[in-house]
Image (spheres, helix red, strand yellow):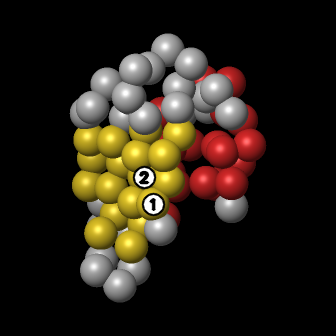
Amino acid sequence: MEYSLYKKDGKFPCDVTVDYDNMVFTVRDSDTTGEVFNNASEVAEWIKQHWSVEQFQRPDDYYDLMK
């Protein structure tokens, strides 16, 4: 699954990839920095530590991502 969320202060979307078939787990922030993870749990932990719902233009997108 791929998700794109827009931060209130970012020009580029934040992209999250959770692909179990190809074992790809990545996050790219709105400043285009990125992280690669070993599993979906690590992605979720990183998101909880670095992002909050208030940062995003559409809070429902953040909640959908975290489900």
From this view, report whether residue 24 is shown above or below residue 3: below
Contact, mark 1 vs mark 2 (Cβ under 8 Å): yes
Q: Hey, which quadrant is residue 53 in on the image?
A: top right
Instruction: Name the secondary structure under disc 1.
Output: strand
From this view, report whether residue 25 is shown above or below residue 48: below
Could you tell me residue 59's position as x and y percent? Answer: 71, 35
Could you tell me residue 55's position as x and y percent? Answer: 60, 24
Specify whether 7 is left or right of 21. right
Q: Residue at x 26, y 55 (%)?
A: 36
| Crowd around label 2: few <14 · some 14–19 · many ≥20 (10 Å) | many
Alpha carbons under labels 1 and 2: distance apart: 6 Å
Q: Hey, which quadrant is residue 38 in on the image?
A: bottom left
The C terminus lies in quadrant: bottom right
Point out the residue furthest to the bottom here: 21
Of residues 17 and 38, the one nearer the viewer is: 17
Specify whether 13 is left or right of 24. right
Q: Which mark is residue 16?
A: 2
Q: Which mark is residue 38?
A: none
In this figure, which residue is indicated by the disc labeled 1? 2
**Residue type at the position of mark 2:** Val
- Which one is earlier in the sequence, the residue at label 1 or at label 2? 1
Could you tell me residue 32's position as x and y percent? Answer: 27, 32
